[in-house]
Amino acid sequence: MTSPVLTVTPRAAIRRAASLMKGRSIGSLVVTSANGKVAGIVTVSNLLDLIARKPEHKSNREVRKARGQEEWDGKEA
């Protein structure tokens, strides 16, 4: 595990999440809500699934969409 734990918000750009994972050679990031509570996790696999599903992938899509959530409800998908 990486210490300190790297986090992103649900509205973080996918490009940002991918950059953090690649730059630190890690496979996942903790997603935290606005109040700092753990809301989930996004993995390299989540990002690859999104790219495979959407050939028109745009790098500014949000992490929450990579996790398959249209509306962020703070619950684990």
Image (cartoon, rainbow, N blue to C red):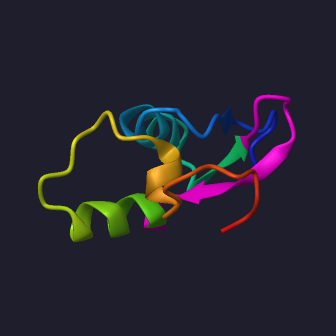
Give the residues in magenta.
32-45
Q: Residue at x 84, y 32 (%)?
A: 36
Rendering coords of residue 7 (x, y %): 69, 36
Is residue 33 highlighted in magenta? yes
Q: Residue at x 76, y 37 (%)?
A: 33
Q: Residue at x 51, y 32 (%)?
A: 12
Q: Kindly indicate the quadrant of the structure image that contains residue 10.
A: top right
Is residue 72 highlighted in magenta? no
Rendering coords of residue 50 (x, y %): 33, 62
Quadrant of the rendering where the C terminus is positioned: bottom right
57 vs 72, nearest the viewer:
72
Residue 1 as seen in the image, left or right of residue 63: right
Seen from this angle, which residue lies furthest left? 56
69 vs 63, nearest the viewer:
69
In the figure, 6 relative to 44: above or below? Answer: above
Q: Residue at x 70, y 52 (%)?
A: 73
Q: Kindly indicate the quadrant of the structure image that contains residue 6.
A: top right
53 vs 25, nearest the viewer:
53
Rendering coords of residue 75 (x, y %): 76, 60
For the image shown, how many numbered marks are present on the structure?
0
Residue 5 as seen in the image, left or right of residue 52: right
Residue 47 as seen in the image, left or right of residue 71: left
Residue 58 as seen in the image, left or right of residue 33: left
